[in-house]
Amino acid sequence: MQPGLYHILFISAALFFIGVYGFLTRRNLITMLMSIELILNSVNLNFIAFNKYLWPGKMDGLFFTVFIIAIAAAEAAVAIAIIINLYRSHNSIDVENAEELKY
Amino acid sequence: MPDATIIALIPLLPLAGFVLLGLFGRKYFKNSSGIIGTVLILISTILALYTAYTYFTTANVGFYPRLVPVNYTWLRFSENLSIDMGILQDSISMMMIVVVTFISLMVHIYSLGYMKGEERFSTFFSFLSLFTFSMLGLVISSNLFQIYIFWELVGVSSFLLIGYHYKKPSAVAACKKAFIVTRFADLGFLIGILILSFSSGTLDFNTLIATLTSPESGQLKTAAASTFLGASALTWGAALVFIGGAGKSAMFPLHIWLPDAMEGPTPVSALIHAATMVVAGVFLVARLFPVFSITTPGVLEIVGWVGAISAILAAIMACTQTDIKRVLAYSTMSQIGFMMFALGVSKYGGEGGLGYTASMFHLFTHAMFKALLFLAAGAVIHYVHSNEMKDMGGLRKYLPITHITFLIACLAIAGVPPFAGFFSKEEILLAASQNNTIIYWIALITSGLTAFYMFRLYFSIFWNKPAPSPLERAGSEVHHHEGGFAITLPLVLLGIGTAAAGFIPFGKFVSSDGRALESHLHLQFSIAPVALGLLGIFTAMWLYKKQNERPEKLAASLNGLYTSAYNKFYIDEIYLFIAKKIVFNLIGRPAAWFDKNIVDGLVNLTGNSTTAISEKIKKVQSGKVQQYAIYFLAGVIGLAILFIYIWK
Amino acid sequence: MNLLLLIIIPLVTAVAVLLLRNKQQVRWISFAGSVAQLVLAFTLFFAFRNERTPGNTAQMLFEQNYALFPSLHISFHFGVDGISVAMIMLTAFVVVAGVLVSWNIEKMTKEFYFLLILLGLGAYGFFISLDLFILFFFLEIAVIPKYLLIGIWGSGKKEYSANKLALMLMGGSALVLVGILGLYFSAGHSFDLLNLSKLAIPIEKQRIIFPLLFVGFGVFAALFPFHTWVPDGHSSAPTAGSMFLAGISMKLGGYGCLRVAAYLMPDAAKEYSTIIIVLASIAILYGAFATMMQKDLKYINAYSSISHCGFVLLGIGMLTKTAITGAVMQMVSHGLMTALFFAVIGMIYDRTHTRQVSEMGGLMKVIPFISTAFFIVGLCSLGLPGFSGFVAEVTVFIGSWEKTNIFYRIATIAACMSIVVTSVYILRAIGQTAMGPIRENFSQLKDATWNEKLAAVILIIGIVAIGVAPFWLNDLLRPGAEIIMNKLIGK
């Protein structure tokens, strides 16, 4: 069976909510970062799928995907830098321990 | 007619003196400031005499016009309404410049001796010059507002001079009281000016009087038609203006500042609080006399009654005071009362205008003898270093010139012929008897009382108990002479003036409508007042010539009256009650409280409630990233639902 | 005469001050800059007269217009009429005096002077702006430095006062901003004052916008009941801060009420005049009575400022030519007078280290110059002829009396009554500080230094110049007031 747009969208949605769920429940910053990657990738999937099924003659979706991959890479670099610094100062990468920015 | 510059110089020279001495006196003219001030006043006096002489001699026979040689627009409000600085020449302003400059000159000379060695010598003279300038400006004002401006300026110079001994708490209190009481009266004056100027559409005296007295003028009709609380606008205006005059002239019930003002140096009392400034109220009524007399006769009647009441009240109070300057102060008040009711019983023009002439005449003679009395009292005080009668007595041997001049002045004020006071008082009584019998009787009794308290003063100072011998006083390093030439010269000059001024045919020069008035001496008429005066003198002699028990017995027998008169009929206390209890406690304090607690409280409440609310809702900002994410997600989902299902 | 100079010179001075390192240099450069502003203000005055005398009757002179943001119709539009010239001169006087009395500030001198000059800059910009947006911009510049001036260099409960002042003034300017935007959208998308004045703004819109603008500016001008920042702000501010606050900032409000609110929306001004007059009369009397109860010199002057600024609003509310002239005169007069008053209070405080009236006495003996200045400013405040206060108050009174209605009459009489109350509290203050027996602990005080003397003399010259020869100020202001009046009566 040839997978249709709906299948891919279904997977993408599932991936998105898994990401959201992970982001909201995990306390570990690395895991949260991974969840964000999942969310981004679900978006990538959407772009590719829409591009392929709705406007096959265009490349915009693919470009956006490439952009998002690049941004995700940059973001991962920044985020990991932050996490490392957090680990140095707090000796933990548990997000619950970093709540000085309240009030 | 003299050149306008000459007239303008009369007030401007003292002004120059004030500026010069005020700015540089302390540094550069420490010792010469007295001379500088005196010379400037001397020039002013000569110019004033010359101006007055030319005015009175070159006028058409028997008629003195109102001239305005200088008029400079100072502040323009509209086409007709402007405050001008100008000079108005008429008979009363010409008379006043002579009086003011002459008395001021006397006081300047006297102060050269009296104030010698004072720390703020130059300041004193600069203030004196300021006062002289303001007073001259006042009397030659051509504009109703100009008179108000100078009115305030004389008030402030009086304030500065009363407070000259600024380290003395009583002097500070007195100068504040004087200023505030007269200021209160000036409020009436100001509103009165607003009413009169609005009714007549001008501030210029000539136009104003012309508009408000001619029955055809439209403004007069409109003003008379508009009423407030049952009186026409003009009546209100004139009455309010008179309140201003009453305040400055220490008329009942606004007189309370005058006795306290005696805290000032004695020359100041002589100049400001006896001869010149306090008669400004009389002058004001005289200046606007046509309006008072023709347009608002009701107000003129009030003027008469206020004058009469003040005259007798002050005379009674004067009988009981023991501070010699206060006695003189009350006597001033009483004599100004005479001038006021003389205006009050007068009519405009012709024979009926006798009261007006008499009032101005009395103003003129009173300036002479009252200044003399004060200056002589100053010499006494200088000698015994006390204001209290009980520290004096038997001084006639030590102060011969003072004694003689004081006696002349006492005779003058008591109305004994042929001294100045006799003539002017006679005219006043005559005018009163022609127009208002009750006021006439009040005046008659008052003139008896006047003779009594003046001679009580005279005998207590110069006779009574023997003076302490020079030996006893040797320890206190007191000078045993009358003070120098500077002190005696003014006394003698004023003494001559007092003796001679009565023979001036005053009615020829000053009258209500500018036309010469023939006044005759009615010999039969003067029997009663003179007899009463003599009776007063002899009573005083009987009581006070020798030290004895009679005064105390008399005081004891008149217990209630005596104490209440001694305590000035408790008027001060009433004022104090109103000021302290009502103004301060019932208005000021609540206002301050309201501001601090209610208005500011509301502002703070706004601030505090904002803080409280934010305190409550700040918990949302927990610092937990995942909570924020949940809010975010919920928000996104909520918005999505909103846009998809509700706002399609 | 290029009006931009009025902005450029303070700007250059401010930047130069920031670049300097030496405190003494900072002082002298600021002083030089402020003197340059004073000279400029006088030049402007004479240039203005030279233009007007031959009969140049254009409403605004020396106009300049540069488009700043054409799509939103915002432009740098400058120009002056007599009223602005008078206000500019006032600002220049106060700036010089303020710089001089701050000579002894040691803490963060550079920043202090920078902020002072910035405040002056804001005021100049405000007075020459003919574009409401730019006007608002300069209004804000004149507010924010005050927060820092009080918060850093203040005394007493300075944080509280700084917050209160900044918040209330910001609240006021927020109302102003809303009002200005309202004008923009209701009348042909224009911020230009002269343009707006030619357009007819519908009366329904005016009824909404006028209160916003009037109250907004009124907060600056101590409109009752939005005046409570005045006592606290003044009492905590450093001397120069108080001088600027009372001498300049409060005048921004009065000027705004007149130039923006009343001028652009005459119909609403007429409708609301009753309320304005009631509030102004309350402020005058109530401020005066509240002053009577104060014991701290700065509070005395702060409350008396409320009372005196009431005359400004009263004059504007009366809407007659003379009353409006009087209102502007009162702004100028009160600005000079109150600046001098605060300067003198600062000088006394520097020496006695107290501001409580009851703790002083006999200062005339030890510090005669300062005490004499205190006398002069006190007498000016109670409206003595020969000083500016009298001229201004009398003009307001006469202008108010032109209204024949009994309501206006009563308001005028109420305002007149304040002259008595004023004399009571002024004489109490003078009597207890300058006069009376001297206190032992104050017998060694030093009199004013050269800079303090110069500051006082400059302000006294201003006060006396208006008081003795008011006609020049009158001639300067009347045409401006006439234009506003003509719009009011619909000519």
Image (tube, rainbow, N blue to C red):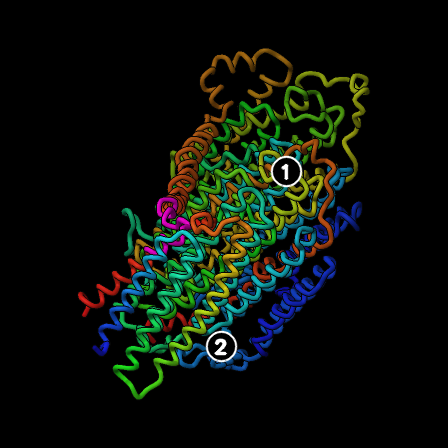
Instruction: Identify the amino acid type marked 1.
Output: Met
Q: Position of residue B635 (x, y in %)?
A: 29, 59
- Asked if one can make out residue C136 in the rendered structure from this viewpoint, the answer is yes
Locate residue B617 relative to residue B374 in the image: left or right: left
Q: Report which residue position mark 2 lands on.
A: C76
Q: Position of residue B368 (x, y in %)?
A: 62, 41
Magenta stretch, overall SS: helix
Name the mark on residue B527: none
Q: Which chain hosts label 1? A: C
Q: Nearer the viewer, residue C427 or B614?
A: B614
Q: Quadrant of the C terminus of chain B?
A: bottom left
Q: Which chain hosts label 2? A: C
**Mark 2–mark 1 contact, CB under 8 Å?**
no
Of the two numbered discs 2 and 1 in the rendering, the one whose residue sits closer to the viewer: 2
Q: Quadrant of residue C319?
A: bottom left
- Asked if one can make out residue B135 in the rendered structure from this viewpoint, the answer is no
**Up-down: is C14 above or below B538?**
below
Q: Position of residue B607 (x, y in %)?
A: 40, 47
Q: Position of residue C270 (x, y in %)?
A: 31, 64
Instruction: Identify the amino acid type marked 2.
Output: Phe
Start-end of magenta stretch: B614-630
Q: Quadrant of residue B47?
A: bottom right
